[in-house]
């Protein structure tokens, strides 16, 4: 009986020791009340988040964070974005704040979108309280900015205004592109829309420049007016990415004057109208 009592007391003491240790690991790292902005990148799992929180001085035990997130089912619900956390938060307060979602969110704007499509991207992600007002403001501010809204992945607060967003996109354009003539930007927008891979962009740019120099109509499907009129459209038709912009700055010479894409997206070049017509028959008219 005495041995049993000793064993029970030992187990109780062990349990209390473990409990006290675990409890101590849930307490705030410090009494510091200054905010820390904690960034979670896309694709970051709970394990990496835990390690980063530890390195940032926001939690004591990455192991407890991982265990809690796993067994509570929250590990798969972590959202990418920026969080405002404090070192005087307990472990459970940190988890609660992360579970609420970020104060800033990632928005990816792919290459080749028009300003109307970009506005819808932001509306879908940010979900502003008055989407119609947001849309109208965005389109009014970007009235003469087509082509300059740089495609990229941006981090914005949920309540970001159209002006804040547009200023950031224009600043990114200035940073990554710099000075460029309107004519080259228009050409870059055509190349962006006419091509499907990075490898073909400089070649297609070279073909279109050859047509311009020879005073041919450009005849690009993405800008129907180029079938009737010589020269470039008056303004960019979309917002090109950096690779398309570089393609028009350094176009690649080739013997080709024509090109088309088959139903699988593969490009086929031709040196003469006769070769091009054969490609049309082979790749577009046959099933």
Image (cartoon, rainbow, N blue to C red):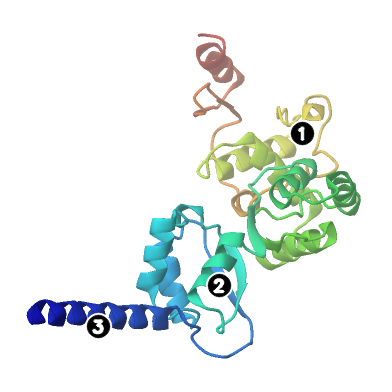
In this view, 281 is above or below 273: above
The residue located at (52%, 62%) in the rendering is 41
Q: For marks 3 and 2, give the CA distance.
A: 28 Å
Q: Secondary structure at mark 2?
A: helix
Q: Label 2 to label 1, Cα distance in Å?
A: 68 Å
Q: Which residue is mark 2?
A: 93
Q: Earlier in the sequence, mark 3 or mark 2?
A: 3
In this rendering, would 156 be left or right of 282?
right
Label 2 environment density (alpha carbons within 10 Å; few <14, some 14–19, many ≥20): some
**Viewed as shown, does residue 171 lie left or right of 71?**
right
Q: Nearer the viewer, residue 42 or 216?
A: 42
Please indicate, yes or no, whether residue 80 appears anywhere in the rendered image: yes
Please state which of the two labelled residues, at mark 1 or mark 3, is closer to the viewer: 3
Relative to the observer, which residue lies in front, 207 or 146?
146
Return the mark for residue 13: 3
- Quarter of the figure with residue 94: bottom right
Residue 93 image position (x, y, % from top left): 55, 72
Q: What residue do we see at 49% from left, 80% from top?
A: 56
């Amino acid at each position: 009986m005495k041995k049993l009592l000793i064993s029970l007391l030992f187990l109780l003491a062990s349990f209390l020791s473990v409990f006290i240790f675990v409890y101590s690991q849930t307490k705030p790292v410090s009494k510091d009340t200054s905010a820390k902005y904690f960034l979670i990148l896309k694709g970051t799992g709970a394990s990496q988040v835990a390690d980063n929180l530890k390195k940032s001085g926001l939690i004591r035990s990455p192991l407890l964070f991982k265990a809690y997130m796993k067994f509570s089912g929250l590990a798969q619900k972590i959202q990418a974005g920026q969080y405002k956390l404090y070192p005087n938060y307990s472990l459970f307060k940190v988890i609660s704040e992360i579970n609420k979602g970020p104060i800033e969110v990632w928005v990816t704007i792919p290459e080749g979108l028009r300003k109307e499509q970009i506005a819808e991207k932001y509306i879908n992600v940010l979900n502003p309280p008055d989407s119609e007002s947001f849309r109208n403001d965005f389109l009014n501010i970007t009235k003469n900015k087509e082509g300059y809204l740089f495609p990229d992945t941006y981090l914005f607060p949920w309540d970001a205004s159209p002006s804040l967003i547009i200023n950031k996109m224009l600043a990114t354009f200035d940073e990554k592109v710099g000075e460029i003539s309107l004519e080259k930007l228009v050409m870059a927008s055509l190349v962006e829309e006419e091509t499907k891979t990075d490898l073909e962009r400089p070649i297609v740019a070279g073909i279109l420049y050859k047509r311009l120099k020879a005073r041919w109509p450009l005849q690009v499907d993405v800008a129907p007016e180029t079938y009737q009129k010589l020269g470039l459209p008056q303004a960019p038709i979309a917002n090109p990415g950096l690779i398309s912009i570089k393609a028009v700055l350094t176009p690649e010479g080739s013997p080709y004057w024509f090109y088309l894409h088959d139903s699988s997206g593969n490009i086929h070049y031709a040196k003469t109208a006769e070769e091009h017509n054969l490609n049309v028959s082979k790749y577009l008219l046959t099933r």
